[in-house]
Amino acid sequence: MTQTASPLRPLASSPGWLPWTSLLVVYVVWGSTYLAIAIGVETVPPLLLAGTRYLVAGALMYAVVSRRRGPAAPAAGPDAPRRVRQWAAAAVVGVMTLSIGNGGVSVAEQSVPSGVAALLVATVPLWMIVADRVLNGRHVGAVRGAALAVGLVGVAVLVHPGGGGVGSTSGLVILLVGSASWGFGSVVSGRLSLPADPLHSAALQMLTGGAALLAAAVVTGELGDLDAGHVSLRSLLALAYLVGPGSLLALTAYVVALRTLPTTTVATYAYVNPVVAVVLGALVLSEPVTAHLLVGAAIVTLGVAASLLARPRPT
């Protein structure tokens, strides 16, 4: 989930175990969502799966945030333009990250192993370097440039057709396009008028991104072709997991961790999640773990880690 650049206040009097437990939840739960998506798309169309996930999770998050923030202001009034800007900003970011990014993951996992999908999505920090250069004109620098180069070599190793077990070419392309869109959306989010409260911002992004995904499901015929009688309990349980632990619990844990731990520590989820995904994919779905996959994963992880460590600190 994309987070805004707004500063987060430290949690008052939180127990010492809470931030580290929260980070562990982010590691395991977000890493396991790739497995849940692979199981979900077995009998639920991918855009419908992702759209339902985010629309339901966004509605629940929005209800919680609204209750915490008190009664909503009237639809018309001095705050109306600001609210319109926030919804519009959330729609832009939600479509770029959730609709194209995560929707692409759901589509791709019909023909690409979940572990490979997670490894390619882990390149989002590398795409953010490119987006930062293109959109903000920020100098890449030697270290970040080297990290980008290493990461791209890892991607080339992963998608090389001679490796075997990496999935269809179309699925790999969709994952790379989705990851690029997520990276650009993450950078764009820092330039838009998103709500300062990260949970409020996330709720709006999930609602707008989920609505866009469901609209795409209608346009592409997924909704009309759905046969509810063929949807398995296994896929429904996967969808419930994606809504609850995969979206609501993990996002809340991420916010708690980000408020109490160094950003560089929390950012390690970017290269722990793929490890969790590869392990779970192998254990539950018997996805192959080849030497080719391990070499590509190691190179991508090295590039992502270097890019996170070399990320410019806010001034």
Image: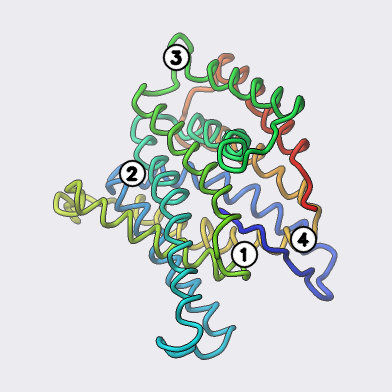
Disc 4: which residue: 19
Disc 1: which residue: 252
- CA separation, marks 4 and 2? 33 Å
Residue occupying image coordinates x 63% and y 38%: 137
Residue occupying image coordinates x 84% and y 75%: 13
Nearer the camera: disc 2 or disc 1: 1
Mark 1 / mark 4, whichever is N-terminal: 4
Mark 3 / mark 4, whichever is N-terminal: 4
Which of the two residues, 1 or 91, is positioned nearer the viewer here?
91
Disc 3: which residue: 164
Q: Position of residue 279 (x, y in %)?
A: 58, 34
- CA separation, marks 1 and 3? 37 Å
Q: Position of residue 254 (x, y in %)?
A: 66, 58
Q: Position of residue 271 (x, y in %)?
A: 66, 37
- CA separation, marks 1 and 4? 11 Å
Disc 2: which residue: 41
Q: Is residue 66 above or below residue 17?
A: below
Quadrant, the N terminus: bottom right
